[in-house]
Image: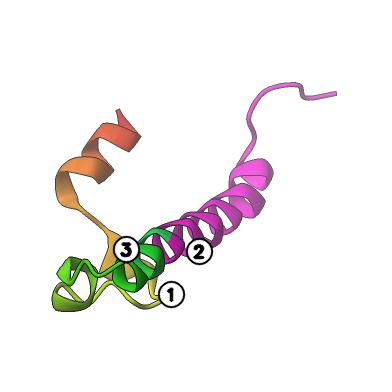
Amino acid sequence: MNNGIGLRNIFFTLPAIIIVLSVHEYSHAKVADLLGDPTPRNRGRLTLNPLAHIDPLGLLMLVL
């Protein structure tokens, strides 16, 4: 019985994390847009595409 983090767990968990983070960040962008902040629309973040929400420094901090 393997109690550690296995390749199988990562295989199923990573896509779920990417989807959830994309929906979460889209929700932030949508609310900001509805409240009158033009920044998300100007930066192209009003999308569910996970690549639009990747911030290099934020990604580095998440990995570390």
Residue 17 falls within the magenta-colored stretch? yes
Disc on res. 48? 1
Residue 59: x and y in percent read 27, 44
Mark closer to the chain start, 2 or 3: 2
Q: Amino acid at mark 2?
A: Val
Count neighbours of disc 1 (C-alpha within 10 A) and say few if under 14, some if 14 to 19, many if 20 or more.
Answer: some
Measure the alpha-carbon separation of dots 3 and 1.
15 Å
For the residue marked with disc 1, what is the amino acid? Leu
Where in the figure is residue 2, as x and y percent of width and height? 77, 24
Q: Residue at x 43, y 75 (%)?
A: 48
How busy is the neighbourhood of tag 3: few (under 14 within 10 Å), some, or many (20 plus)?
A: some
The image shows residue 22 at horizontal and vertical percentages of: 45, 62
Query: What secondary structure characterizes most of the magenta part?
Result: helix
Q: Is residue 8 above or below residue 32?
A: above
In the picture shown, does residue 2 fall above or below 22?
above
Tell me the element at label 2.
Answer: helix
| Residue 9 belongs to magenta span | yes
Amino acid type shown at disc 3: Ala
Q: Crowding near pointer 2: few (<14 within 10 Å), some, many (20+)?
A: some
Image mark for residue 32:
3
Q: Which residues are magenta?
A: 1-27
2 or 1: tag closer to the N-terminus: 2
For the residue labelled by badge 1, is the local secondary structure a helix, a strand or a loop? loop
State which quadrant residue 33 falls in. bottom left
Question: What residue does disc 2 label?
Answer: 23
Q: For the residues carrying marks 2 and 3, which lies nearer the camera in this image?
A: 3
Secondary-structure class at tag 3: helix
Residue 63, placed above or below residue 18 = above
Query: Decide: marks 2, 1 in contact (CB < 8 A)?
Result: yes
Viewer-nearest residue: 51 or 43: 43
